[in-house]
Image (cartoon, helix red, strand yellow):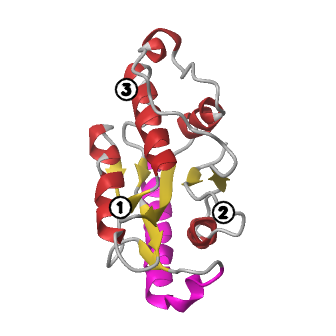
């Protein structure tokens, strides 16, 4: 079982968002837990159609690969979604994924309840806080424990491979990863 699933909403092959999630994952692993970074790249994530089949079946019936990711999250202790900022807000496919993940949890065995996590935003100039606010709505409505660090979980980067130009942002992501690992271990003890 993987302890923490980290989900990237970036469509890019050399993604700053995945790079930031890798930094977070390494910090979680340094603190004794296992991780898996899953990119949505190449997938066509559909929006929830409110069919409520998840209530009777316990899974999402839309066939775009998200249900396999949902099963991994269902068996994890932590969940960290990350979005690149597009036009001042979270990219659409990550929000569609979060809405469906939440719908399946609420409609079935409430696997997200008391799960530890929080969002990360990666972008060039602005929209980070709005992206975090938008993604943060997912956590309390699903009875989750949302963590942070000493500042917002955001990294400023533009061209691919430029996350290292925001050392403060990366330090906040490291602390966030450490906090996730520490809390999961305390809960499991």
Q: Is residue 116 above or below residue 47?
A: below
Residue carrying label 2: 12
Query: In the image, residue 103 lies at what x, y percent?
Result: 40, 28
What is the secondary structure assignment of the residue under circle 2? Answer: loop
Q: Which mark is residue 131?
A: 1
- Residue 59 against residue 134 in the figure, above or below: above
Q: Nearer the viewer, mark 3 or mark 1?
A: 1
- Separation of marks 2 and 1 at Cα, in angstroms: 18 Å
In this rendering, which labeled residue sits more in front, label 3 or label 2?
A: 2
Q: Nearer the viewer, mark 2 or mark 1?
A: 2
Total numbered circles? 3
Determine the secondary structure under disc 3.
Answer: helix
Write the residue at 30% across / 68% down: 129
Can you give x and y, in whole percent of width and height, for residue 98 in the image? 44, 42
Residue extending farthest front: 87
From the top left corner, tell me how far across and down residue 86 is, in percent: 44, 63
Instruction: Report the magenta residues as a range.
Output: 161-189
Q: Residues within 10 Å of mark 3 (few under 14, many from 20)?
A: some
Q: Spatial distance from mark 3 to mark 2, Cα to Cα?
A: 31 Å
Q: Which residue is mark 3?
A: 106
Ranked by sequence position, the earlier of labels 3 and 1 is 3
Given residues 168 and 1, the one toward you in this image is 168
Q: Residue at horizontal 43%, vertical 78%?
A: 172
Q: Which residue corresponds to the image point at 41% horizontal and 15% vertical from the top-left?
A: 52
Q: Are marks 2 and 1 in contact (CB under 8 Å)?
A: no
The reply to whether callout 3 and callout 2 are in contact (CB within 8 Å) is: no
Badge 1, how many Cα within 10 Å: few under 14, some, many 20+? Answer: many
**Does label 3 or label 2 sit earlier along the sequence?**
2
- Above or below, 102 relative to 92: above
């Amino acid at each position: 079982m993987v302890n923490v699933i980290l989900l990237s909403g970036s469509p890019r092959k050399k993604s700053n968002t995945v790079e930031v999630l890798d930094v977070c994952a390494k910090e979680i692993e340094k603190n004794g837990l296992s991780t898996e970074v899953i990119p949505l790249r190449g997938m066509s994530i559909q929006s929830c159609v409110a069919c409520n089949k998840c209530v009777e079946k316990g899974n999402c019936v839309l066939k775009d690969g998200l249900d396999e990711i949902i099963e991994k999250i269902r068996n994890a202790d932590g969940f960290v979604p990350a979005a690149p900022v597009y036009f001042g807000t979270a990219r659409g496919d990550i929000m569609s994924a979060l809405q469906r993940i939440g719908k399946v949890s609420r409609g079935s065995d409430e696997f997200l309840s008391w799960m530890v996590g929080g969002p990360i935003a990666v972008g060039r100039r602005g929209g980070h806080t709005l992206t975090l606010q938008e993604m943060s709505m997912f956590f309390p409505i699903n009875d989750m424990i949302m963590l942070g660090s000493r500042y917002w979980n955001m990294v400023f980067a533009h061209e691919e491979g430029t996350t290292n130009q925001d050392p403060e942002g990366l330090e906040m992501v490291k602390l966030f990863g450490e906090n996730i690992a520490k809390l999961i271990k305390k809960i499991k003890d």
